[in-house]
Image: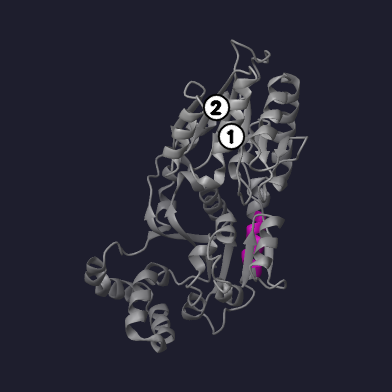
Amino acid sequence: MRLVLIVPRFPRLSETFIVSKFIGLADAGWDVHVVCTDTDPWTPFPQLANRPALRRRVHRQWPHDSAARAALLWLPALLLTLLRAPRATLRYWRQAWGGGLRRAARQFYLDAALVALSPDIVHFEFGALAAGRTYLKRRLGCRLSVSLRGYDLNYVGLDDPDHYAALWRDADAIHTLGHDLWQRALRRGCPADKPHALIPPAVDADRFRPAPATDDAAIGRDRPLRLLSVGRLEWKKGYEYGLEAVALLKAEGVPVRYRIVGGGAYLEPLAFARHRLGLEAEVEFLGPRPPADVLDELRRADVFLHPAVSEGFGNAVLEAQAMALPVVCSDADGLAENVADGLTGFVAPRRDPAALAEALARLAADAALRRQMGAAGRERAQACFRPAAQIAAFDRFYRESAGGNGGDDHAR
């Protein structure tokens, strides 16, 4: 069966979980492809860059950055798609014709790369991408599935109670990362009997391997507490509360260094917050970093801090636990399913810098507790979030999703 994953860009530094899933399914024998609007450099991902055969499975949509360019390329897109997949192209047009020629032509141009692949299953990696495109199920004669993440359920379409109505009707199966997101999907109108699977992220514990323990000296003047956060600079990550917690530690005489990996539009307000709190010497914004650099940062850190106000699950938090780092995080959404409070770290109320600071101070004062929680986090990551188990779960999910033919017989 041919499975096509729909994503905005590929491969993205902030979406390494999709890269891992793509590679895992390919290695498991799936005829898996990616269709994206644009591509990013492959060099930060050696597991992709060293496998040119996988590059041929990544397909960009036809350019649509301007209406004039799209108009110029429309006919070549039609002819090439017709040449590659004549039956799928004709089926698409038969199904689309009743909706009006202008609209059908515009939709076909955006869908041409997908039509040419003649998929058996189309999977949207984000629910926001699926809204308005569930017609693909009928036009391609395929099955349709979707992953619903925190962004999809917590922000998109909140002002429209029917925003996902077509998705709830047409999707053959729903994937969420955990129970919290499934409950949110139900509150957004997903039928309770909709086929679904709760498949959490996975982490390669062999790749995310901590450095051998060296310095367990107590935190003091010559040994600051080394904090790390990894994630895009967005308001939902709650970095300002992390900065306030660091300011509280500093006021209590706890030496601390806080490094933040990630890029994004929220850098300017966060830099101002750092200045306002007098933390220029304690806080450093490192910008986006390739995966290898992130590993180095994780190995240097003492504690992973994730003060989010909204989070679907938190892949970076899971990776930190695999690296034997104790985690201090908020109770935002799915984080409570990720971190075992009191065992692999501390879960504090969201938007509560004092609670974050209290947990950080406790870890700063107790090297043995840091080691204990770090070891428990790595053990949990190895036991509960194995890549092989995740790929096996996705294999079942897609095979069960393909249990029907999506309507009419799938024309090949």
Q: Is residue 172 magenta?
A: no
Q: Of discs 1 and 2, which sits in the foreground?
A: 1
Residue type at tag 1? Gly
Residue 350 placed where, x, y %?
66, 43
Q: Residues within 10 Å of mark 2 (few under 14, many from 20)?
A: many
Q: Quadrant of the N terminus?
A: bottom right
In the rendered image of this protein, does residue 93 appear above or below residue 39?
A: below
Element type where label 1 sits in the image: helix
Q: How many marks?
A: 2
Choose between 167 and 124: the one closer to the eye.
167
Q: CA distance from mark 1 to mark 2?
A: 9 Å
In the rendered image of this protein, does residue 79 appear above or below residue 46?
A: below
- Which residues are the magenta region? 392-400
Residue 147 placed where, x, y %?
58, 61
> Residue 269, labelled with which disc?
none
In the rendered image of this protein, does residue 79 appear above or below residue 236?
A: below
- What residue would you read off at disc 1? 242
> Residue 258, labelled with which disc?
2
Residue 177 placed where, x, y %?
65, 55
Dot 1 or dot 2: first in sequence order is 1
- Colouring method of the image: one colour
Please give the name of the residue rendered at 76% of the width and 39% of the height, measured from the top-left corner: 341
Q: Is residue 142 at all visible to an observer of this figure? A: yes
Could you tell me what secondary structure mostly forms the magenta stretch? Answer: helix
